[in-house]
Image (tube, helix red, strand yellow):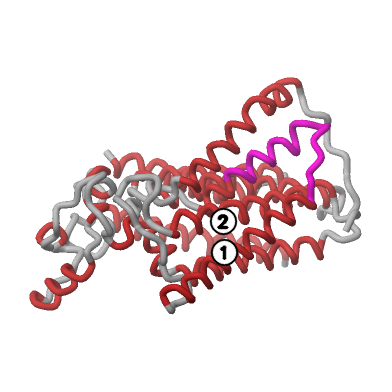
């Protein structure tokens, strides 16, 4: 009986994979600008990221679309837009050069607050589940791991800090930066036996960062009468001091996510006996 | 060019997924899961989504694999024989 189930399950899985593979190749072979699938062959990276990152004056684009009734994707090159110069243009949709960031923090800031809350709740659940599970010794790290850890983990943490501080300029942001910091701390945890994870420090960083996020959002409510409104001067596109509160929020989110993920991993490694 | 690279990565990902399901040892399954995350991040980079690629490389092939490994260590000796 068990064997029959296994064969049936394998057959169904194989059929699904074949069907998915057919869809995969069909999507890849679609010519660009014809269907709604992603064009792959005719697109250059610089065409998508660098040159068009500045096509953000949504008002003009939407007026054009209303008057012509065309879809934005097909007619993107014909949408009228102001020329935007790096280091000169000001206040183009809150001034952040990375358009993903300007969407995630400006337009969907409340979503970001919710995502941070979801992560917080999942780490609380992990802490609850790990209660009463004892620490198990892991194998002693080898010489290569020890030596590599001592000089690689500071670099990894530094790169994580760079990713979330420059979140409004280059690809990245709070969540990737926090995850990179947590992976650097993971390397410390498994590579250095003398390393003790300071759970009080991580808890205080996490709580203060969460409070700061809500505080920035409430400041927007008081200054501009809207929760999470961008109330700071937005500066010039491409400079570090630009995009208003986007940079502040990403620094806060990066610290919070890094502290949360690192404390979760430390909890899994050490067991939850202390709490 | 992109089509060839993405096809090769995608086929390898499918094989790694099969390996993750049918591997005898759990550690083999976890490592092939990490391979899927790594190749997915390369595909995201080629499809001009560097934000997603960074996140996938850090979480999909780094942290989640570590979490699985720690969980496996805590459940050692309780596997179905």
Name which residue lies at 55% across and 50% down: B17
Q: In which image quadrant can residue A56 be found?
A: bottom left
- Chain ID, mark 2: A
Residue B57 or residue A272, whichever sits in front: A272
The crowd level at tag 2 (other Cα within 10 Å; few <14, some 14-19, many 20+) is many
| Circles 1 and 2 on the same chain | yes
For residue A180, above or below residue A131: above
Q: Position of residue A271 (x, y in %)?
A: 85, 51
Q: Are marks 1 and 2 in contact (CB under 8 Å)?
A: yes
Name which residue lies at 82% across and 53% down: B79
Q: Main SS type for the magenta part?
A: helix
Q: Position of residue B16 (x, y in %)?
A: 54, 45
**Residue A185 drawn in magenta:** yes
Q: Which mark, by number, is residue A252?
A: 2
Q: Position of residue B53 (x, y in %)?
A: 45, 47
Q: Secondary structure at mark 1?
A: helix
Query: Label 1: which residue?
Result: A213
Magenta-highlighted residues? A180-199
Q: Secondary structure at mark 2?
A: helix
Q: In which image quadrant can residue A246 be found?
A: bottom left
Q: Which mark, by number, is residue B22?
A: none
For residue A183, above or below residue A126: above
Q: Position of residue A224 (x, y in %)?
A: 41, 74
For residue A174, above or below residue A214: above
Left/right placement of residue B29 relative to residue A69 reads right
For residue B69, above or below residue A105: above
The crowd level at tag 1 (other Cα within 10 Å; few <14, some 14-19, many 20+) is many
Residue B75 or residue A143, whichever sits in front: A143
């Amino acid at each position: 009986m068990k064997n029959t189930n296994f064969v049936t399950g394998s057959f169904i899985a194989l059929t699904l994979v074949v069907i998915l593979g057919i869809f995969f190749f069909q999507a890849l072979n679609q010519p660009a600008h014809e269907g709604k699938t992603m064009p792959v062959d005719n697109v250059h990276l610089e065409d998508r990221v660098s040159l068009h990152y500045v096509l953000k004056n949504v008002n003009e684009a939407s007026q054009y679309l209303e008057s012509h009734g065309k879809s934005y994707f097909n007619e993107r090159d014909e949408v009228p837009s102001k020329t935007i110069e790096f280091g000169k243009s000001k206040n183009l949709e809150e001034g952040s050069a990375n358009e993903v960031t300007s969407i995630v923090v400006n337009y969907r800031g409340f979503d970001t607050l919710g995502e941070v809350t979801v992560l917080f709740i999942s780490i609380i659940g992990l802490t609850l589940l790990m209660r009463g599970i004892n620490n198990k010794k892991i194998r002693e790290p080898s010489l290569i791991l020890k030596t590599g850890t001592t000089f690689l983990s500071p670099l990894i943490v530094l790169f994580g800090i760079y990713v979330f501080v420059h979140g409004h300029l280059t690809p990245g942001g709070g969540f990737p930066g926090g995850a990179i910091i947590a992976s650097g701390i993971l390397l410390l945890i498994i590579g250095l036996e003398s390393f003790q994870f300071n759970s009080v420090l991580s808890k205080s960083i996490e709580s203060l960062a969460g409070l700061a996020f809500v505080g920035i959002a409430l400041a927007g409510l008081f200054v501009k009468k809207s929760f999470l409104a961008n109330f700071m001067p937005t500066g010039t596109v491409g400079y570090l001091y630009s995009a208003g509160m986007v940079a502040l929020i990403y620094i806060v989110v990066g610290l919070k996510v890094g502290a949360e993920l690192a404390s979760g991993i430390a909890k899994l490694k050490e067991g939850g006996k202390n709490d | 060019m992109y089509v060839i690279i993405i096809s090769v990565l995608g086929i390898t990902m499918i094989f790694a997924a099969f390996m993750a399901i049918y591997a005898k040892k759990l550690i083999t399954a976890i490592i092939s899961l990490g391979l899927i995350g790594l190749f997915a991040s390369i595909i995201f980079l080629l499809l001009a989504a560097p934000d997603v690629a960074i996140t996938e490389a850090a979480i999909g092939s780094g942290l989640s694999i570590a979490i699985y490994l720690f969980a496996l260590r805590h459940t050692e000796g309780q596997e179905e024989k």
